[in-house]
Image: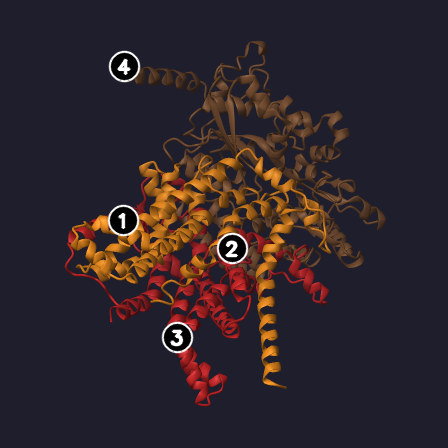
Amino acid sequence: MTIRQKNALLLAAKYVVIIVGALFVLFPIYEMITTSLKYEVDAFKIPPQWIFKPTFANYREVLFQSNFARFFANSIIVAVVSTVVSVAVGALAAYALARWRFRGRTPVVVGTLLLRMIPPVILVVPVFVLFNNLGLTNGRIGLILVYTALTLPFNVWVLRTFILELPYELEESAIIDGCGDLTVFLRIVTPLITPGMAVASIFTFRIAWNEFILSLVLTNRVTRTLPVAVSLFLTDTGTEWGKITAIATIIAIPAFVFTFTAAKSLITGLTAGAVKG
Amino acid sequence: MFRKMLAILILVSLAAMGFAGGGQEEAAPTVDASGNGGFDWRAYEGSTVVFNFPNHVHYNAMMDSGVIEEFEELTGITVETDMMQYLNMHDKQVLEMSKPTGDYDLISMVVMWKSEYAMADMIQPLQPFFDNPALAVPDYDFDDLVPGYVEVTGIAGGENIYRDGPGAQLFGLPFGSETSFLIYRKDLFDEYNVKVPETYDELTEAARFFAEEVPGVYGLTMRAASGHHATHGWLLHASPMGARVFDDNWEPAFTSPEAIETIEFMKTMIEYGPPGMEGFTQDEEFAAFLQGDAAIYLDASVFAARAKDPTVSEVHDKLGFALHPTAKTAGSETGGFGLAIPANAASPEAAFLLMQFLTMKETERKVILAGGAPFRMSAVNDAGLQAQYPEFAVLAEQLKYANPDWRPIIPEWGEINGPLLGTAINQALTGQKTPEQAMADIVEPVRQVMIRAGYIK
Amino acid sequence: MSSHGIAGRKPLNAYLFLLPAFAVLAGVLLIPIVNGLRLSFFDWPLRNISKAPVFVGFRNYVELFRSEFFRASIRATLIFTLSVVSIELVVGTAIALVLEGDIPGLRFFRTLYVLPIMIAPVVVGVVWRFMYHPSYGKINFFLGQMGINPVGWLSDPEVAMKAVIIADVWQWTPFVFLLVLAGLQGVPKDLSEAARVDGANYTQTLLFVKLPHISSVLGLTAVLRLIDSFRSLVVIFNMTFGGPGVTTEVLSLHLYKTAFISQRLGLSSAIAVILLLLIFALSFVLIVRGVRGEKR
């Protein structure tokens, strides 16, 4: 066997690995989408109908459910506002931690990282009690505050790495020109860390859009978000898989969009810290 | 100043209303039959009732029947609905009812939450409403409601907290209540000439027969998943087999030979049941019958309408109905849902109007025609309805054996039901422990719950 | 990693820049957590949430350590966490090693592999539960085609944990793969070239050049996965809800059930404290080391 043949064979083997992996990755997603396009009785057919006439009946039922538009709007509002607030607040803090040496900096950095580890479930009880006293249990504001807090540590961490990579000279000359710290941050630093802010935004949006447990407890009929709405369709009288997978597919749309339009930012975000730290 | 006066005015009028109701607490909740023409349905025109209910056969029928719209038309009250998966409803309701003013004006509760809500003052006694002539519909006919359902869904504070008796008050009305009976595949029973089981021995034999002799068909479908479902499945058979959760002194009684025998029976049924049945929740229990995998169903009676619905059931035209088989005794479950008004409801009066409207005879009939379950004796015994719904005759007979003491729904039941009893039963069903071991292991944890709540020392 | 931190800037501004973040974190994370810690010494049934909690000292903790189901949930957490982290690390690293280098189309597949990570845990739980269905699920259907009897994926105590692990491996192996691939791309080309010129074979290059170079990436990946799997809840919540028995009832699910099903807010706070301590213990060492490393 020549080296060339050997290389070709090796490449072929690699493609086999890639494709098998991709099949494993894609099958559940394929299953979700196709089930959402089948009639309820056909979803359970064994042997499965691999070829079938798709129907949008499930989507029609889900979308015209009296409250769906409301849940959808809540999810959008909560996710977008949390993202904007968390990234803005996170960028400010990241800048302070990257560019100042001050007493307590190391504990703050360590503390921020520790906060990133907090399991959302432990917040459920005390946050409910706190918000109940403050009258925040039914509004979207409470949920936005929680998602901001949960995503801040990651955003501070990611944005700080991006700021640390900027050459300091630009800021230095601006300071010499008499710019204040806030002006330097807004005019010089922010434009340069846009890629970092994109990463932070996508990850914040992902958390706020997908979160389940806190939303389950902290929302009501008016403020409920989509992941909680899924559980409404897990009925007691024969789980309506068609509708569930339809709403699951709708929830997954941002995931598809981000994956195929901002793959680079995603991979930066996922590898942030791990590779650079 | 003006605000203060307004507040005082409101307080005074509230107090007046309270007195009007409070004077006759002892009277039975029967409704004055005279003068039904003068009732004013529009007294609360313009207010809004927020109604929380489960995604469940009966409530789906309610939505499909158009009775909510009819109520809105009749009263000028707006009804906002909030539908949920039933086991999720509990957390949501408790959280809402622990706020100063809750989101809900009317809730549907699973009967096992009744005592918990009532004893924590989360829901309101209904007697003051029934005593108020401005609120009580004259021709309501309270006594026509299935008495067993009323006791199990609505009454708390009497004997053992969850039964009727001295000190008991009415907190809820049945709507989506159920007992248990047998639904079987008439086509298969006829084809193979199998006797419809009247006893548990015959039930076991029929289940064995289908599992072993008929390809592609299994015996009984059952819920058994860890937690609430396993406990429900167990209680369903424990009652006729003579097993109980507590003895008369609130000491655990679930290690008795009868209790163990009940688990052994369930294990046999799993052997003859569809694959993976030891992990079935209620919807999987249903699905196995609807898809034609199981020949026998023995559980909540509300399922009948769904089994007959051709859009979801492959077996809708092949059904027979029979009584819950007997073992030591005849005893079917009493459960399902009831309506109640949270103590912190914003518009309790309007909610009470909706509650009555939904449980009136005319409404009941419309909900039944849309696939709901009957809860009035007049409907169960109605010859016309019995002709149209063959299961009603069986139901009428079954209700005589419905056991209101079927499940000890004390306020602490939630902690015992799923986390302790239901977990142990599932451990036994899945072979992680022997039935004796599994039940013995939770005696002490259950006793701790009862000690903490002050039942025993 | 260089550090540009300039000591000369006014410290006051640093605190002002930190203030909003600090306010949110203190208000929504720190204060509730401290309250939770305090609550772990009280008995407070959810149904009596409008009444005052009752002080019980360490009784909640004593009860936990006596409870068979609590010990079972610790065990379930350890089995789940250690299994998923080790499987994902090995498989993810192996795939990354196979696929490193310039393979046409890799970028596209790498994008595909991100998909599971982005999908909501609720959706993951629901879809896998559907696929695991004993009679109608596709997995048992495929097994049946191969002549294998139906498996009670979510109902058999011997299998349920494996089923949960498989779903997690599906969702998170791509994460390990991406991280390791990024790490491998950071290995200087000339280093492996030099090794090969010196006569090292593939295994030797791997063991002595590549793996040492990505060891810090591997370590951090392991910690990130360890922490995330330790706190994972929603997938299991929607797939098994802890069953059969308590075999898949991980600590965070046990906490949720204690709070909202058993309605013991105090006891659940004690579980929260233990969960938090375990997670901090796991991560603290590495983070401190990471920050120190950065300073150097």
Find out whether the residues at labels 4 and 3 contact each other: C-beta distance under 8 Å.
no
Q: Amino acid at mark 1?
A: Leu
Residue B419, position as x, y percentages in the image:
49, 52
Which amino acid type is marked by label 2? Phe
* Residue at numbered disc 3: C215
Instruction: Tell me how far mark 1 sits from mark 3, CA to CA.
Output: 38 Å
Viewer-side label of 4, 2: 2
Q: Nearer the viewer, mark 4 or mark 1?
A: 1
> Circle 1: is it few (<14), some (14-19), or many (20+) Cα within 10 Å?
few
Q: What is the number of the mark on residue A260?
A: 2
Look at the image and tell me whether residue B450 can be seen.
no
Asked whether, in this view, residue C258 is left or right of residue A231, the answer is left
Chain appearing in orange on the rendered image? A
Q: Is residue C197 visible?
A: yes
Which chain does the brown colour mark? B
Badge 4 crowding class, 10 Å Cα cut-off, few under 14, some 14 to 19, many 20 or more, is: few
Residue C119 drawn at (x, y percent): 51, 54
Question: Which residue lies under the disc numbered 1?
Answer: A186
Question: For residue B2, which numbered disc appears in the image?
Answer: 4
Q: Chain of mark 3?
A: C
